[in-house]
Image (spheres, grey):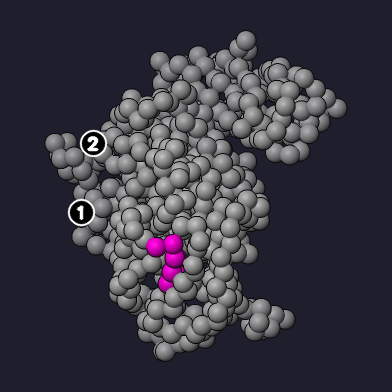
Amino acid sequence: MAVTLFGNGSVTLAVEVPPALRGTPVLFVEASALRNPRDARVYVEVYLEAADGREYELGNFTFFGATPDEDKRVFAFALEAEEREALSSEVARVRASMKPFDANNGDVSDVRVDLRAWIEVR
Amino acid sequence: MSNGIRTRQNVAGMTSNHPTLAAYRAAVREMKNLPESDPRNWVRQAQIHQNNCPHRNWFFLPWHRKYILDFERICRDLSGDQSFALPYWNWTRTRKIPAPFWEGPLLDTTRAIGPHAEISGQFVGRPIIDNILRQSDFELFGSFRPQGQNSTDPSWQRREGAEALLERTPHDQVHMWIGGNMATFMSPLDPIFWLHHSNIDRLWAEWNSRGHGNTSNALWRNFTLRPFNTLVRDLQSITQLGYTYPSLAQTRLAEASELPPLLERTRERFELMEPQVASLGQEVSFSVQTPESPLALAAEGAAADDVIEDGSKVLAFVWGVEPPEDEQVTVNVFLNCPYLTAETPVSDPHYVGNFTFFGVHEHEDGAEGEHDMKQSFVFDLTETVDRLRALEPDLESQLTVQLMPVPLEGRDVPPQEFGIEGVEIVYI
């Protein structure tokens, strides 16, 4: 199920962890229905929240070349050994946070995008 | 230019009147002045990107390699500088857009940032780049195949895959950070675009030079990129395409951090440890008998997938090379070339790669003794073997690794001799 992320805000996604983690687990984040009326320059930071409360920064993505009629795009995050250890439970919590590039034009609350995430093993 | 190979240089430190930037500026000015009916026109060039560029899938790297290669040739023609090579902008070290791009034809007034803005390390910092170069899986490095791709039909070129770290972070974030035209698919309208992509291309070349192989999947290798009508597999070797980057010395074993895990998959090793002395302009060859032909190895994969079997590699280790007294020497490496001379070009199908000795004497005053100056290098022969298989199907099960030391282009180097301990072939 997709969750809507607003500019200057955060959302947490519950992601099912595959039972067998042989190989490299990869988190995929699908971004769809981007609405950005002012073409604000924004990016999204992605974190993995471990059961013990620790947070791992997985990286970030942005919307290069986005057009109004764009459908969706998918971003892949290979999980390092440490992050893999944090995937102990059946469900992982992934937090996404949208921020502006330009501190002088920091209100990007009119931007929103729908996010969905899943984990696959390569 | 060395042996017909142009070196793309770092733009950092180039002043506005540097010959490379002067030629680039002249070419850009000329392209902007050309009528729109001329395909070399500046806007027409950007439209090639807008109408064809694959993003967010595994054609991203080879398509942009060909795109900037063709652009570079236009720059040579229009500037009249036949030695011109597109420079690269290494944003990891130079966080601002270089000063020459804030004036004249190299300025794009649509940029959202000013000349003093610096891009954040969270997008282009050394740890990010190290992480990118550590990936061993091609798709985790260069983005994923289009979802569901099951043929080489042209329609797959722009279908969605998934963005991996190189495209997702430094590539995309630099585009968006600059903003204006750079945030759109008309981004080639900004003259910095081409140097940004030259750096992306350099990172791909560096990843390869560290021993990482591109995917051998036929859906990637045998795909014809539009509008160039060029096969992806023909875009893998930058020296075959006529250019290189100055910092690609990563064939040195000490820097090939991914080799140990790779070597855990070793299937066969064949060594010839017979020390030889190399001289400038003279071939030194090491012939290794291989009971299992590398061509049979390749053919085995071909039967299954029309390409070398997934993950199979043929590596050559050149062990214990004693640096010559004058380090202005490059050693070109060839495989099974029956007509090798000092003039054999690197565009020859038998060419494998080269190594140099840059900076080796800088440490002579340190604690390291002469013995420690010896260096070893590793080369991935897989592509060369595959290429030769097509040319010489009756190749014997013998691999002859040939080393040809020559002076660096334009250098006057006195006669040099240096020792080489041996060569080892490894099948993985």
Q: State which chain disc 1 sits on.
A: B
Residue flagged by tag 2: what amino acid is it?
A: Arg
> Residue at label 2?
B44
Specify whether residue B335 is in view. Answer: yes
Location of residue B279 in the rendering, given as x and y in whole percent from the top left corner: 43, 85
Rendered image quadrant of residue B15: bottom left
Q: Main secondary structure of the magenta part?
A: strand
Q: Residue B213 has which mark?
A: none
Split into 4 quadrants, where in the image is the C terminus of chain A? Answer: top right
> Taking A8 as reference, is A83 above or below it?
below
The part of the chain drawn in magenta is B396-402
Residue flagged by tag 1: what amino acid is it?
A: Leu
Rendered image quadrant of residue A5: top right
Q: What's the distance in space between the residues labelled 1 and 2, CA to CA? A: 15 Å
> Residue at label 1?
B78
Rendered image quadrant of residue B5: bottom left
Of B4 and B384, which appears nearest the observer?
B384
Label 2 neighbour load within 10 Å: few <14, some 14-19, many 20+: many
Within the magenta stretch, is there residue B399?
yes
Upstream in the sequence, badge 1 or badge 2?
2
Q: Secondary structure at mark 2?
A: helix
Of B390 and B278, which appears nearest the observer?
B390
Specify whether residue B250 is in view. Answer: no
Residue displayed at 64% across by 84% down: B370
Split into 4 quadrants, where in the image is the N terminus of chain A? Answer: top right
Tag count in the figure? 2
Label 1 neighbour load within 10 Å: few <14, some 14-19, many 20+: some
Location of residue B164 in the rendering, given as x and y in whole percent from the top left corner: 54, 35
Q: Is A47 left or right of B228, judged from the image as shown? A: right
